[in-house]
Amino acid sequence: MIETAATDLLVQSIVPLEVTQTEAFQYIQSDALLSASLWVNIALAGLSILLFVYMGRNVEDPRAQLIFVATLMVPLVSISSYTGLVSGLTVGFLEMPAGHALAGVGTGPDGTVFTPWGRYLTWALSTPMILIALGLLAGSNVTKLFTAVAADIGMCITGLAAALTTSSYALRWVWYVISCAFFAVVLYILLAEWAEDAEIAGTAEIFNTLKILTVVLWLGYPIVWGLGAEGLAVIQSPAVTSWAYSGFDIIAKYLFAFLLLRWVASNEGTVANMASGLGSVSRSGAAPADD
């Protein structure tokens, strides 16, 4: 009996309100603005996949091909994730803790808050692909690439923890701060380390364009979280926050990928002339001699 009670308590902490996938799907479809924010991304992800495959049809250099594969994974992950969101598979309705502006008065069933937690899985799988593509473009070494990807995944997972914590309002913000700390590591590598590497690799012009695009848009995500229903609830409409996230995704993923792949396809020789292997370019701009 004790074990049963403990199990029931655990389930209640994870799923405080039992809402079926069908009910979640109907909730999403009943809000035309919310539904459109998801379906538009599914359509654009599908078109992007077809376009990017076509753009890379003649790319032969292995490093350029790897950039294409990493970038192609972004819309592939997105179309899978947004399908999960729109179907109700990766969304939930959470009761906010005491102290939260929407505690007991949320816009979901029984005063809960609509929480599309599947977005964090999307970001945990797609943003590392963006960083891998950028790192390859900059001619980064393995250490920097691993650090950027690891910090990025940490940022997404702790962001998920912030969204799902219902035991304490303060702890939601503790997770948020931890997530931002991981984000600061990613920003440092993008703005300082890889910018310098790109100068050496001869890809600084396109890298700086993509760097600015990425940094500006990625900064928007924690701002929307802080102002949205999951944070301070200044913006309470799930449709508005969903469109904000979807808008960022459209530009930070599909437009970013198009600009990157168009440049790589047109400058394959520059990519091919980078020293083979990550980290083999020295600060003087020359590849180190073999022992």
Image: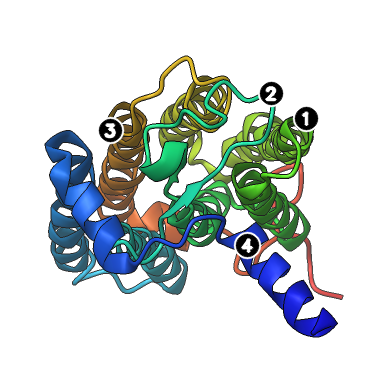
Q: Residue 227, how many percent across, how many down?
A: 51, 19
Q: CA distance from mark 2 to mark 1?
A: 8 Å
Say whether residue 86 is visible: no
Image mark for residue 9: none
Q: What residue is at 71 percent from the left and 36 percent from the top?
A: 172
**Residue 72's x, y, as percent?**
33, 64
Residue at the right extreme? 291
Do labels 2 and 1 touch, CB within 8 Å? Answer: yes
Residue type of the residue flagged with mark 2: Gly
Up the image or down, 16 lies above or below 10; here it is above
Query: How far across and down, in percent of the image, does residue 135 sit?
Result: 58, 51
Question: Residues under labels 4 and 2: Cα distance?
Answer: 20 Å
Q: Secondary structure at mark 1?
A: helix
Sequence-earlier tag: 3 or 2: 2
Helix or strand or loop: what does disc 4 sit on?
helix
Pick the quarter of the image with the C terminus: bottom right
Residue receiving disc 3: 239
Disc 4 and disc 1: Cα gap in Å?
A: 20 Å
106 or 136: nearer the eye?
A: 106
> Is 240 left or right of 52, judged from the image as shown?
right
Query: Which residue is denoted by mark 2 in the rendering?
Result: 99
Identify the mark nearer the N-term, 4 or 3.
Answer: 4
User: Which picture quadrant has residue 162?
Assistant: top right
Report the residue marked by disc 1.
170
Tag 3 near tag 2, CB within 8 Å:
no
Q: Earlier in the sequence, mark 4 or mark 2?
A: 4
Q: Is residue 50 left or right of residue 75?
A: left
Q: What kind of residue is marked 3?
A: Ala
Query: Amino acid under label 1?
Result: Ala
Residue tagged 4: 12
- The amino acid type, in three-letter code, at marker 4 is Gln
Please identify, in this view, whether the residue under mark 4 or under mark 1 is nearer the observer: 4
